C-alpha cells in the first residue's frame, strides 16, 4: 500500500524532497567504503521523510514556500532524519529485528557489531551537521537524542508491568517519539529564520503531532492485521509494551481477564484474545479519543502562524493522522 | 597495581581533576533515575582521566597553569571523557565483555539493550556539552565520534586477515584511539584560548601520543600476563585482531609457522605458542621501535610551545608511555 505524505501537497515539496535525498546520500558517505555501504542501507531503503518534511514546512511557514527551501533548512532536515535512521539501527539490534521497511535489517545483514557502530556513525554525522547550523541547533539535537534514550529506557523499565501508569506511558512516548518530531519542526523554524513566536508554535505542533502519532501507532498494533502493518500485529503485547489502549482496557470491566492473559509467557492465542478484549472493551476507542485530542492540539498550535501553503501542509498532516487510525496503513 | 598519571605532576592538576569528577557526575544525571544509575556506572568506577587531563594540560600551556583550569576547559574535558566512556559501553556490548575495570560491565549488569541506550545517552550528553562550547568544538567532537566508528569498522573488516596491511592497521588505530586523544588536546586548546599555532601543536601531540599508546597496548597483549593486564592476555589473537607486533612477526622468519597458528579456531595452546613466536621473533621489538618513534613525535610536537608546567606534563606523559611497555601496568 503506497502512502503519499500529506506534506506533498506543498507546491515546492517534491523538489525540496528530491534535493533532500541527494544531501542525505552525501551525508552518509564515510572514508571507508564498507562503512558507507552499511550507513547508506536504510537511507537508500527510502521512507516518507516525515521529519525533514516537517523541518522544511516549518521553515517555510514565514516564507510561504514561494521558493524551494533554503540550504540550511534542508541540512536541518538531513540531521533529524539521520537521528531517526541511526536510532532505528540501534532499535533493530535491541529488538533483534530481521526486517526493516522492505529490506533486511542492518543487524540481520551485517551483524550487531556493525549495526551498533553504523548507528553511532549516523548519530555522529547528524551532530556534525547540526554543529554546522549553529550552537542552538547542535545543543537541541543533542538533547533530543538524550530524550530519545530516556523515553526508550523508561519503556524498558515498564516492560510487562500491568500497573504501568498512563503518566509513565506519556513520558515514554514524549521522549521516544514526540521529541524528535518537535525538534524537526523547531530546527526547521530556526534555520528558516521564522519569528521566535512561530518557532514555539511549530515546536508545540511537532510535539502534539508526535504524541498523537505514537498513540495511533499503538492502536494499530491492536486493531490492524499483519498485512496492514507489514509486521506481526500484537507484537507490543508479546514484547510486554503495554500501551494506551491496553492500559485503558485494564481499567474497564474486561480488566481482570486481560490482566490474567498478559505476561512474558503469553501464547499467540492469548495475544489474540487480549487484542480482541482491548478492541471490544472500548480501550481502543478511549485511546483514539486521546489521540484526537493531541491531533487537535497540534492543529490548534498552528492557528497563530501566517496563512501559507506550508502551514496548510502541517494542518493537513495532523488531520491525516486520525484517518490513519480508521484505515490502517502501516508504519509512518 | 596503582598507576599515578604523569599528569598529576601539574601543580593544580589534583584540584582540577577533583572539579572534573564533580562535573562528570553532574553531567550523567538523567531525568530518569534508573538511566542516571546506568549512565553513571562507569563514571563512578573511576579511571585515570587521561583525556580530560590532556584537555586541561593543553588548555593550560599558554597560561602556565598558575590558576585552576577555567570552566570551559573542564567542560571540554567532561565532553571527551563522556565520549570515551560512552564508546566503552558500546564496545563492551560488542565484545560481550563481563567486566570493565574492576566492576561488572554495563551489559553484564543491565543487559545489552540498556547498555546500548545508555551509551547513546552518554554520547548525546557529550555532544550537548560540546554544543555549549561553540560550533567548532561541537563539530570537532561529532567528527571525532565518526572517526572512532570508522576505526572500529576498519578493524572488524580486517578480523582474522593475516594479510592485513600495516597501513590498514595504522588507519584503524588512528581512528579508534588517536583521534579522541588528539581531539582532547585540541578542545582543551580551543576552550583555553591558546594561540592557533599551539592548538595545532597539541593536536599533533595528542595524535602521536594516541598512536604510540595503542601500539604499546597492542604489545602488552603479547607480552604481559593476565594479572598484569587485568584481563586475558593474548585476547587480540583469539578475537582475530592482528596488531603491529603480529603483522611484523608475520614477515619475519617465524611467519609461516605463525600464519598456520592464527585463525578463528585457534586453541589456547596455539595462542600461547603464537605469543611466544611474536615475542621471540623480534616482532615486539620492531613494534616497540615504531611506538617510540610516535612517542618521540609526540614530544617533538611540543617544542614550539611556551615552557610551562602544563607543557612539561604533556612531555612527561609521552616519556611515561615507553616505560609502560617495559613494565606492564594494565590498560591506560
Image (tube, coloured by chain):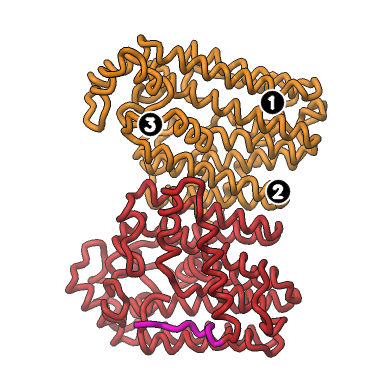
Chain colours: A red, B orange
Q: Earlier in the sequence, mark 2 or mark 3?
A: 2
Disc 3 versus disc 1: distance between alpha carbons? Answer: 42 Å
The residue sitting at 33% across, 69% down in the picture is A102
* Closest to the observer, B152 or B115: B152
* Closest to the observer, B320 or A164: B320
| Residues in magenta, as a range | A1-9
Chain letter for mark 2, please: B
Position of residue A76 measured from the top left corner of the image (x, y, whole percent): 62, 66
Q: Earlier in the sequence, mark 3 or mark 1?
A: 1
Residue for badge 1:
B14
Chain letter for mark 3, please: B
Dot 2, crowdedness within 10 Å: few (<14), some or many (≥20)?
A: some
Q: Is residue A5 magenta?
A: yes
Chain letter for mark 1, please: B
Dot 3, crowdedness within 10 Å: few (<14), some or many (≥20)?
A: some
* Marks 3 and 1 share the same chain: yes
Q: Earlier in the sequence, mark 1 or mark 2?
A: 1
Dot 1, crowdedness within 10 Å: few (<14), some or many (≥20)?
A: some
Disc 2 versus disc 3: distance between alpha carbons? Answer: 35 Å
Q: Secondary structure at mark 3?
A: loop
* Closest to the observer, B49 or A123: A123
Disc 1 versus disc 2: distance between alpha carbons? Answer: 28 Å
Please tell me whether residue B236 is drawn above or below residue A315 in the rendered image: above
Q: Secondary structure at mark 1?
A: helix
Q: Is residue B155 magenta?
A: no
**Answer yes or no: do the residues labelled 2 and 3 have beta carbons within 8 Å?**
no
* Marks 2 and 3 share the same chain: yes
Residue for badge 3:
B164
Q: Which mark is residue B136?
A: 2
Q: Secondary structure at mark 2?
A: helix
Res B281 quadrant in image: top left
Res B244 quadrant in image: top left
Amino acid at each position: 500500500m503506497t502512502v503519499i505524505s500529506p506534506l506533498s501537497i506543498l507546491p515546492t515539496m517534491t523538489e525540496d524532497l528530491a534535493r533532500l535525498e541527494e544531501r542525505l546520500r552525501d551525508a552518509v558517505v564515510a572514508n571507508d567504503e564498507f562503512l558507507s555501504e552499511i550507513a547508506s542501507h536504510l537511507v537508500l531503503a527510502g521512507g516518507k521523510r516525515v521529519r525533514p518534511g516537517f523541518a522544511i514546512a516549518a521553515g517555510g511557514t514565514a516564507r510561504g514556500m514561494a521558493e524551494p527551501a533554503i540550504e540550511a533548512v534542508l541540512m536541518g532536515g538531513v540531521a533529524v532524519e539521520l537521528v531517526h535512521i541511526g536510532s532505528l539501527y540501534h532499535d533493530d539490534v535491541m529488538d533483534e529485528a530481521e526486517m526493516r521497511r522492505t529490506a533486511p535489517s542492518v543487524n540481520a545483514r551485517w551483524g550487531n557489531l556493525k549495526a551498533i557502530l553504523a548507528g553511532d556513525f549516523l548519530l555522529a554525522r547528524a551532530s556534525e551537521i547540526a554543529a554546522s547550523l549553529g550552537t542552538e541547533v547542535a545543543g537541541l539535537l543533542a538533547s533530543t537524542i538524550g530524550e530519545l534514550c530516556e523515553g526508550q529506557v523508561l519503556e524498558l523499565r515498564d516492560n510487562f508491568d500491568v500497573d504501568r501508569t498512563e503518566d509513565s506511558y506519556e513520558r515514554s512516548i514524549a521522549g521516544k517519539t514526540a521529541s524528535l518530531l518537535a525538534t524537526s519542526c523547531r530546527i526547521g523554524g530556526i534555520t528558516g529564520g521564522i519569528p521566535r513566536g512561530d518557532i514555539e508554535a511549530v515546536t508545540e505542533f511537532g510535539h502534539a503531532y508526535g504524541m498523537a502519532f505514537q498513540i495511533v501507532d499503538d492502536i494499530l498494533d491492536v486493531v490492524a492485521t499483519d498485512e496492514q502493518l507489514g509486521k506481526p500485529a500484537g507484537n507490543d503485547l508479546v514484547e510486554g509494551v503495554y500501551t494506551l489502549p491496553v492500559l485503558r482496557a485494564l481499567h474497564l470491566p474486561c480488566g481482570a481477564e486481560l490482566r490474567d492473559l498478559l505476561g512474558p509467557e503469553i501464547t499467540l492465542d492469548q495475544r489474540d484474545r487480549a487484542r480482541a478484549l482491548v478492541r471490544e472493551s472500548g480501550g481502543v476507542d478511549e485511546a483514539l479519543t486521546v489521540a484526537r485530542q493531541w491531533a487537535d492540539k497540534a492543529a490548534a498550535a498552528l492557528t497563530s502562524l501566517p496563512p501559507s501553503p506550508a502551514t496548510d501542509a502541517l494542518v493537513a498532516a495532523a488531520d491525516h493522522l486520525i484517518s490513519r487510525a480508521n484505515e490502517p496503513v502501516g508504519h509512518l
